[in-house]
Image (cartoon, rainbow, N blue to C red):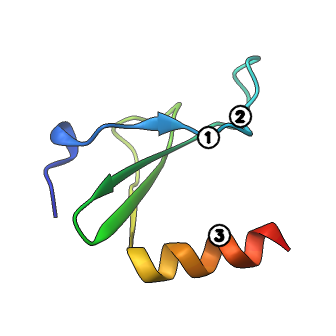
Amino acid sequence: MAPESALLWSKSSYSGAEGGQCVEVAESPGAVHVRDSKQLDGPLLTVGTRAWASFLRLAAN
């Protein structure tokens, strides 16, 4: 896994500009990392790319 400081984070396009519930995602080889944009040093969820692709397919339905 890439060190968290080396990850390039992107805010979800579904996150509003008002600063409420915001999710950020970063990719590294073989993994996708998810965090709360208000808690940069908080918990970090890391899943494999296949699991992430499955999640996105299910969420789109």
Label 2: element kind? loop
Q: Residue at x 22, y 65 (%)?
A: 29
- Number of marks in picture: 3
Q: In the picture, which quadrant includes the C terminus?
A: bottom right
Question: What's the mark number on residue 56?
Answer: 3
Badge 2 is on which residue? Answer: 15
Farthest residue to the top: give it.
18
Separation of marks 1 and 3 at Cα, in angstroms:
13 Å
Q: Nearer the viewer, residue 29 or 18?
A: 29
Q: Are marks 2 and 1 in contact (CB under 8 Å)?
A: yes
Mark whose residue sits in front, 2 or 3: 3
Q: Amino acid at mark 3?
A: Leu
Q: Residue at x 51, y 34 (%)?
A: 37
Q: Amino acid at mark 1?
A: Ser
Separation of marks 2 and 1 at Cα, in angstroms:
5 Å
> What crowding class fits label 2: few (fewer than 14 Cα within 10 Å), some (14-19), or many (20 or more)?
some
Percent x, y of residue 41: 33, 38
Seen in the picture, residue 18 relative to 36 is either above or below; the reply is above
Label 3: element kind? helix
